[in-house]
Amino acid sequence: MTLKEVKEDLREIRYYYEHKKMFDRALETSMKTEVLKKVERYNAYIRTATAKLFGLYVALYVENNTQLVIATDWGVSEGYIRNLNRKLCDYLLEKNLEKEDAS
């Protein structure tokens, strides 16, 4: 897995949460999608992250906020959030690579 693939996964996870009601309705009809596996995998990874990375993951990808909104809410610079997001992506890449090594 590459950093680019992690970022693509995160965009897909953000899309999932943005349209969660639609996905939930599909599940009610027994329609499952691979994105659910991805969401579950990343949610498991983030459970062991630091509080800051966990909070950023929730704020950016689950709650669908922008980096600017988070920076304003947290009282930090947008650059700080950008750097923290880079650390989050690196962390998730490491977790994905660990999973691949264990397989």
Image (cartoon, helix red, strand yellow):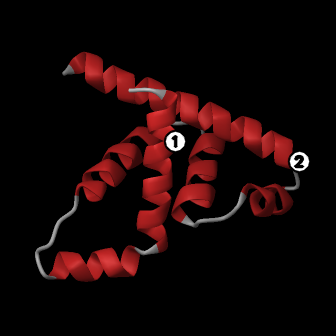
Instruction: Answer above or below: position of 10 versus 89.
Output: below
Residue at the spot x=17%, y=66% of the render? 32
The local crowd at label 1, few if under 14, some if 14 to 19, many if 20 or more residues have their Cα within 10 Å, is some
Which image quarter: residue 103? top left
Q: Are marks 1 and 2 in contact (CB under 8 Å)?
A: no
Q: Which quarter of the rendering shows the N terminus?
A: top left
Residue at the spot x=56%, y=35% of the render? 89
- Residue 45 place in picture, x, y as percent: 40, 39
| Residue at the disc numbered 1 | 7
Task: Please give left or right for residue 78 compared with residue 88 in the image.
Answer: right
Badge number at residue 33: none
Q: Residue furthest left?
A: 30
- Residue 93 place in picture, x, y as percent: 46, 29
Task: Please give left or right for residue 5 compared with residue 85 in the image.
Answer: left
Task: Please give left or right for residue 94 compared with residue 87 in the image.
Answer: left
Q: In front of the other: label 1 or label 2?
A: 1
Residue at the spot x=23%, y=19% of the render? 102
The local crowd at label 2, few if under 14, some if 14 to 19, many if 20 or more residues have their Cα within 10 Å, is few
Q: Amino acid at mark 1?
A: Lys
| Residue at the disc numbered 2 | 77
Query: Which structural element holds mark 1?
Result: helix
Q: CA distance from mark 1 to mark 2?
A: 22 Å
Instruction: Answer above or below: position of 96 versus 75.
Output: above
Task: Please give left or right for residue 97 compared with residue 8 in the image.
Answer: left
Which image quarter: residue 51? top right
Q: Residue furthest top?
A: 101
Q: Amino acid at mark 2?
A: Ser
Residue at the spot x=59%, y=65% of the render? 64
Which image quarter: residue 17? bottom left
